[in-house]
Amino acid sequence: MTLKQAMAELKALGTEQMRQYYAKNGAGKDVFGCKMGDVRNVAKKVKSDHALAMELWKTGNLEARLLATLVCKPKELSAKELDAMVRDVDYAWLADWLNSYVVKQHPEKEALRVKWMKDKHASAARAGWSLTTERVIKDPAGLDLSVLLDRIEREMGKAPELTKWTMNFCLGEIGMNHPAHRKRVVAIGEKVGAYRDYPCSKGCTSPYVPTWIAEMVSRQK
C-alpha cells in the first residue's frame, strides 16, 4: 500500500461524529475521524511496512500516525529517531499507542527510560513513567520503589496531564504489586487526590488510586 492509498482509505473511513469526538478531547485539527477499529483493520491490510510507517508519521495526521505505530518495525528506529517521535506527540491516545506498540518493543528502551525519567517534556516523561510502570509489574529488581514514591508524592499534583496520568498508574501498580508499600501508596493517593472525581461508566474502576487499589485487591481474595 502506498502513502496516497493509505491516506485515501483512512480519509474515507472518517465520520463527522468521530471528528467532533477527537476535537473535544484535544486531538488537534489534522484528523479524519476514524474509529480505532477501522485503523486496526487498515493495519491488517498493510501488515508490516517500516518505510510506509515513517511516511505516515511525517504527515502529522492523527490516524496516519496511529497506523504508523501498528505497521512500523521498532528495531529499525534509532534511539534518536524514537526520542523525536515521542516528543512530537501531544495527544494521550496516540502517546499510548506509540508507547505500547513501538517504545516498549525497542531494544534501547531501558536507556531511554532512564533518560526520559529525568525529562521535563510532558510526553517524554509520560513514556518514561510508562516504561517504569512496566518494570514495576514485570521486573522491579534494581528499582528503588521508595524513591519513586517520593517523586510521585512531590511531583504528581502539579505535573502536566500527559505525565500525571501515567504517574498515577505507576503509583497504583506499586500499591497492587508490592504490598509492603501499599499503605503509603494509598496515603499518597489520598493526599494528592488525582482523579478523585474522575467520571466512570458503570462497571468501570475509578483511576483514583485508593479506590482502584481497594477494588483490585478485593478481587484477589
Image: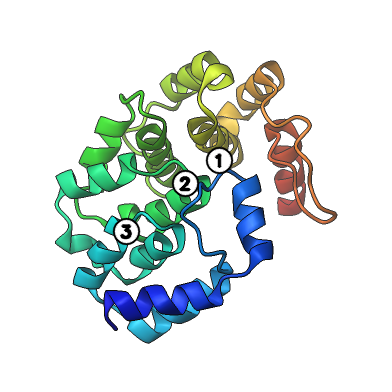
Q: Position of residue 43 (x, y in %)?
A: 40, 77
User: Relative to 24, is 9 above or below?
Assistant: below
Residue under numbered circle 2: 137
Give the side of residue 101 with respect to residue 96, left or right. left
Helix, strand, or loop for circle 3? helix
Total of numbered circles in the picture? Answer: 3
Give the side of residue 52 with respect to residue 149, left or right. left
Please report whichever mark, 2 or 1, sits nearer to the chain's N-terminal start: 2
The reply to whether the C-beta atoms of the residues labelled 2 and 1 are less than 8 Å apart is: yes
Q: Position of residue 154 (x, y in %)?
A: 51, 13
Check residue 173 in the rendering and tell me which mark sits there, or answer none.
Answer: 1
Q: Position of residue 47 (x, y in %)?
A: 33, 81
Specify how the rendered protein is coloured: rainbow
Q: Please name the amino acid that badge 3 sits on.
A: Thr
Check residue 91 in the rendering and tell me which mark sits there, or answer none.
Answer: none
Of badges 3 and 1, the one in the foreground is 3
Q: Position of residue 16 (x, y in %)?
A: 65, 64
Determine if residue 105 is in view. no
Of badges 3 and 2, the one in the foreground is 3
Please report whichever mark, 3 or 1, sits nearer to the chain's N-terminal start: 3
Residue located at (85% from left, 54% from top): 202
